[in-house]
Amino acid sequence: MTRTRSNKGFRRRGVASVLAMMFLVIFGSLAAAMAVVAQGNLRTADSSVKVSRAMSAAETGLVFATRRLASEGRRFVVTKGVIASDFGHKIWLGNVSGSDGEMEILPPDGYESADTPSGLGEAVLGAHLADVHAFDAIPGDAALPDLDTTTGTLLAKPIRMAAGDDDVYFRLKYELVEDQAAIRVTSQGYDRGITRTLQMDFRLTKKIEFAILSPNRLMIGKNVLIEGPLGTRFGADPDQADMAPENGNPLVMRSDFRYLSSELDSAIDELYAAVVTYDTDGDGRLRPDHPVEGIPLTDNATLVDYDDNEYVDDFDLFLKAFDANSDKKVVYDSAKAAAAGLGSLSEEFVDVDNQLGHLVDHALPDRNGDGVTNNTDRQLGWDDGVIDANDLYAKVRGRLAFACSRSEWELARDGDSYQNFVHGPVRAAIDVAPAKFLVDEDEMRPVTTDMFADSAAWFDGEASGDFAAQVASNLSGTVGAAYTAPDDSTWEDVPYGATDAGGSAYDWYARPVYENMVFDNVRIPKGTNALFKNCRFEGVTFIETTGDCTDVNWNYCGAVNRTEIAPGLFAYIIKFPGMTAEVPGVGAVASTKAYSNNLRFHDCTFLGSISGDKPDEYTHWRNKIQLTGQTRFFIDAEDPDLADQADGSSLAAILAAMNDDDVAEMEKSSVLMPGWSIDVGNFANEQAADPDDTATVKLKGVIIAGIMDVRGTADILGTLLMTFKPVEGEGPLYYGGLPDAFNTTVGYFGPADGDGEGVDPDDATFTGFGEITIRYNPNAKLPDGIPWPIKVEAMPLTYVEGGAM
């Protein structure tokens, strides 16, 4: 009998285990994969962090090098005006020779060093040796920092990004740039094996960063805009009583918006009373949201931020006073407004002060900063016939620098704030104080007449043209050339236009007149005392005078007064009868006019520079240059302003034909007349019906004079450097008078301000305040002779990622 086994209850054992093992493998694989991915993410994140930190370290290194080069560069004071590539390399390598001029090396700032470096490279080396955060990252770093004195390459020790952290740091390399006065800095940032490298070049240059720098006091009048810093050393010498009230204030600055209406004058008075009490930063403005400056503005219907720029200044008060339709614009020229696409607007500021409207509307021509002035700038508010917030008005676009002490200045005025005398908004850079006192010589050095002996020598040697021969050649061959001998019809006052403007002249000259002539590298003999009208001067115009003019009577011998003896008939009578002065090699003379030079250039064109003999004493009655009418200066054949001239193409051709080396030398100074008196414009303030057509004196470059007065209508692009420091009882003050009469004046000032040559603005004979702009040119070349620290500045366009250590 066969027995059959029942399958009931039979189970397949192990299936669950197999499935479990399968899932275990799957989940294990997934877990492993996730772990790998997670680890990869961590590594990627760690690498990203390291890359970021290495790049940050490299950026920090460039910033560090920027400050180090700037700090060490300031120690090197050189007299050479232009730092070309070869001279820049000599400064770095420390092999400057006597032919390169003088070089003074100042002590370091922020650390001590027993040795004086021979060059900038050694100075930077010494600064790195003093670093407390430098360390040895690898064995070879123990030999650093190291300067190769042949190539100039400097390798610095690594510098930690944080104290005690050796994992994140940067290292620097400095090297000379071939054919440039520049240093290339390579900065390599490290973070635990990750590196990033950056590179940028730094230019060695020399800049006197002032629109005006003067040892005498400054007077900035109404209708004057300054684009650039102002500096005065008046009051720097504690041994002189400059701060005495009778000697005047180091700076006087007038609001551009006075004399427009009595109501506006009252509002301006209220504003500056509040500025004196509440202005905390010295910018001549008040901020409505500031806890202190906003106090006088609360619930004040007069002092309001009318242009919504978060400041209250006299520009706001002007807009509020003349904006008839409350659109926050003041229309002064409806035709220009229509041409600018602003539609048909009603004029609100007509024949009140046309020159002021034109001045404000034409400030900052290149509104978008692209290097050209065109219709795009007009769309941004330039020359659009409207005065509004788009004009970005500022009296001074830069800082005010004083060598004197604020406390001494105000103490000498019985506690009156200096801001009682300095009116107008000052817009300095965001990281620069609008007003700074006790500025030392390292920052604002004195400029003296004697510094320019070498520069003047080049001009002296270059000007070989005989004046008489060139006059004769013009009379025989130049169309329209004319000469008028001095007679009763050619007398004119000095300063020119003072009498017609209702003021007073201090002397008179019967001038010979030269018209429509062309001169080339000409020497104008002493005693010429001429008027040049519509003449062109090419190359160097060298003006001769007697250097030894130190006799106390020199300034006055031969001076005359004009007396009307019958209607329209005048006599010119000696002002100081019996006075004589000693002329070297000649003896006593009754007039020094024949041994000096007092010249006026009217509607003349200079394709080059003016220079002259250096007078040993400031004699403004005798050694004076006056530039009037549409006198203009050009030296660059590619000057964009030439395109605006009717004869621009022919002038450019003349300039292009000049010797390049001669042009390079003349570019350093358009007017090199240390110790001379220079007048630009005149008191009469001639105005055309259209301000665009008003005759404007145009000057460019560095202008050096003893004292300079600018009146009427003028546009100056460059830097004004004054050399004369008035001292009571000496020179022109020997017979009395006070230093307040010898100041650098820009704009109109009348008798109430101590200017006896002018007329009161309320007088019926007053002809207006004029229109003057002075614009600092950071690219202007400097003449040799001025001891000034070099500047090491970054060249942003050279910034690249990469470079080799």
Image: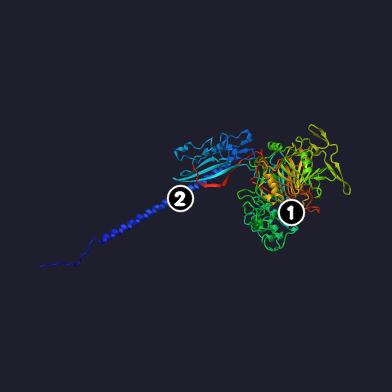
**Type of residue at label 1?**
Asp
Query: Taking the image as drawn, is residue 621 in sight?
Result: no
Q: Secondary structure at mark 1?
A: helix
Is 438 left, or right, of 9 in this rendering?
right
Q: Position of residue 521 (x, y in %)?
A: 72, 40
Is 80 left, or right, of 771 in this rendering?
left
Q: CA distance from mark 2 to mark 1?
A: 64 Å
Farthest residue, direction right: 566
Q: Secondary structure at mark 2?
A: helix
Q: Tell me the residue that label 2 is attached to.
A: 49
Q: Position of residue 525 (x, y in %)?
A: 77, 38
Answer above or below: position of 551 versus 168. Answer: above
Farthest residue, direction front: 477
Q: Is mark 2 in CB contact (under 8 Å) with mark 1? A: no
Query: Taking the image as drawn, is residue 47 in sight?
Result: yes
Residue depicted at 82% across the width and 33% down the height: 588
**Type of residue at label 2?**
Val
Determine crowd level at label 1: few under 14, some 14-19, many 20+ residues with C-alpha closer than 10 A: few
Q: Position of residue 728 (x, y in %)?
A: 75, 39
First in sequence: mark 2 vs mark 1: 2
Residue 251, numbered circle: none
Q: Tell me the residue that label 1 is attached to.
A: 693
Farthest residue, direction left: 1
Q: Position of residue 68 (x, y in %)?
A: 56, 42
